[in-house]
Image: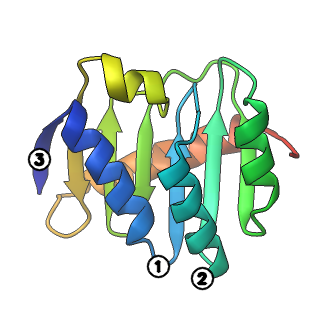
Amino acid sequence: MLTFLTTIGISSTVGEIIRNARGQIGLVSPYIQLSERMKKRLRAADCSGTGILVVHGKSALDAQTREVLSTLENLRLLYAESLHAKCYFNERQLVLSTMNLYAYSQRNNREMGIRVRKQGENGIYSEVLEEVRSIAESAEPQTV
């Protein structure tokens, strides 16, 4: 099932994706700056053994984001210089969006996105995750 989202819906759904993940979280965005709420949710997911994939691109991670990511035991951090895609997912749903994972974007920009639920999506969910896999394979591993 596809659902159209605007800025508030994207932010809310990304939070839901992280909060409700049981096996995997993927955050794919050229620019990443984690809010305090997102940091807490990622820590909680990590404590429950959820695998966390973070792929970023255009700029280096800020010190606070690096500090938080360095505490996550189930993190796979990758850098893809040519990344422009924005995708946020868990094992049941994903968001394809224009919105970077950046506080400024959430507060000041008008964004659009599509939520895809794995159940009943006619292969779109799988196709998106296959592209994420391809991006991850061509990205450079990073340490924090």
The x and y percentages for residue 48 are 60, 82
Q: Are marks 1 and 2 in contact (CB under 8 Å)?
A: yes
The x and y percentages for residue 107 are 34, 25
Residue drawn at point x = 30 percent, y = 17 percent: 109
In this view, the mark in front (2 or 3): 2
The x and y percentages for residue 33 are 59, 34
Q: Which residue is mark 3?
A: 3
- Lower sequence index among marks 3 and 1: 3
- Lower sequence index among marks 1 and 2: 1
Element marked by disc 2: loop
Q: Is residue 63 above or below residue 11?
A: above
* Image-quadrant location for residue 141: top right
Q: Is residue 84 left or right of residue 59?
A: left
Residue type, label 1: Arg
Query: Is residue 98 among the parts visible in the rendering?
Result: no
Residue drawn at point x = 42 percent, y = 55 percent: 89
- Lower sequence index among marks 2 and 3: 3
Q: Which residue is mark 1?
A: 22
Q: Front-most of 33 and 91?
A: 33
Colour scheme of this structure image?
rainbow
